[in-house]
Amino acid sequence: MEHEPGDDVIVVGGGVVGLTTAVVLAESGRRVRVWAREPAERTTSAVAGALWWPYRIEPKPLVGAWALESLAVYEELAGRPGETGVRLVDGLCAGVRLGELGEWAGRVPGLRTESGGLAARLPLIDMPVHLTWLRERLARAGGSVEEREVTDLAGVPAGVVVNCTGLGARSLVPDPAVRPVRGQLVVVANPGITTWYTSAGPASAASTYFFPQPGGLVLGGTAEEDAWSLEPDPATASAIVARCAAVRPEIAGARILAHRVGLRPVRDTVRLERRPLPDGRTLVHNYGHGGAGVTVAWGCAREAAGLAGPAA
């Protein structure tokens, strides 16, 4: 049975930000449905390497708080890695100095300067498992996920509409300020690497990173501004493997398992705000998280839930 428009929330968008926001809303007592254009397994979130780290996201003063709030949740979830997909894994951010980062960095447990960069034990999330877990947690709280295409936010029949459409907001809102930054990854059979590694200039189109995930070693990456192609480029893939092998030579001969491409929804600043719909109902925007949707998901979800207001 359809709910009356005034008594429930529909979250538009089924990636990590949409599902996390729906969970927070449902667990606060709201009746919540997620309308997603495609299954979570086909979203940008599913492609993410998913190391907790504020990457390509603004504004920095707000991002730190959102990220730390999310970090606390992931540290708790890491106690059940098989169920939640979250593990705490050691690694190195090469070429980064503590003084270059915001105040948030001083509150990350164990983040320390080591030869070549910053070392830390951080959440690394196996996204297919985590997205499934979020859906199941939402269902336990009474929420549901439906595959529905939305072409008009004002036409969504709920008292509160929460827009978590990521790059889709470019045409749906419409908001030309949100744009794609293309990321290409290569997944290889892990030759025995147990730690993560990243080396990425904030403005560079090429980066070097590897993340040991249960399904293989994820190699990256790229950050190509305003690039829309979802087709993996063979030359780019070869270059990614070569950069990673320069750090860990055993990667050079690893068997390739998969190629992945995702489009990060980058915006000059995350859009997290409440707006009235033409008929007086509430619209909450929560999109534009760039390369850090996983990193800030819980902090942004709680703020979005607050903007949605209390259950009637």
Image: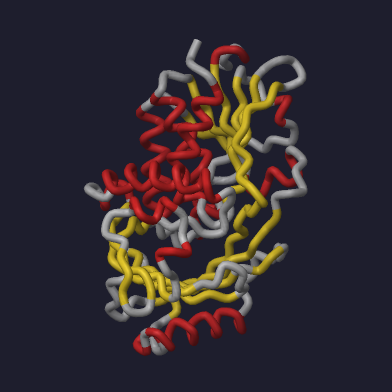
Task: Give the answer, above or below, for where 74 lies relative to 283.
Answer: below
The percent position of residue 180, horizontal first and vertical second, equals 67, 58
The percent position of residue 73, horizontal first and vertical second, equals 33, 42
Of 92 and 85, nearer the camera is 92
Q: Does any portion of residue 257 appear in the rendered image?
A: no
Task: Give the answer, above or below, for where 274 lies relative to 259.
Answer: above
Q: Does any portion of residue 46 appear in the rendered image?
A: yes
Residue pictured at 35% horizontal, 65% vertical: 213
Q: State which quarter of the image contains the N terminus.
A: top right
Residue pictured at 60% horizontal, 12% vertical: 6
Residue pictured at 73% horizontal, 46% vertical: 170
Which residue in the rendered view is the most extreme toward the left?
79
Left or right: residue 91 versus residue 30 is left
Choose top left, top right, bottom left or bottom right for residue 87.
Answer: bottom left
The percent position of residue 149, horizontal first and vertical second, equals 67, 38
Left or right: residue 144 versus residue 88 is right
Choose top left, top right, bottom left or bottom right for residue 121.
Answer: bottom left
Of 216 and 64, nearer the camera is 64
Left or right: residue 213 versus residue 19 is left
Task: Give the answer, above or below, for where 106 lies relative to 15.
Answer: below
The percent position of residue 306, horizontal first and vertical second, equals 50, 25
Task: Give the answer, above or below, for where 98 lies relative to 149.
Answer: below
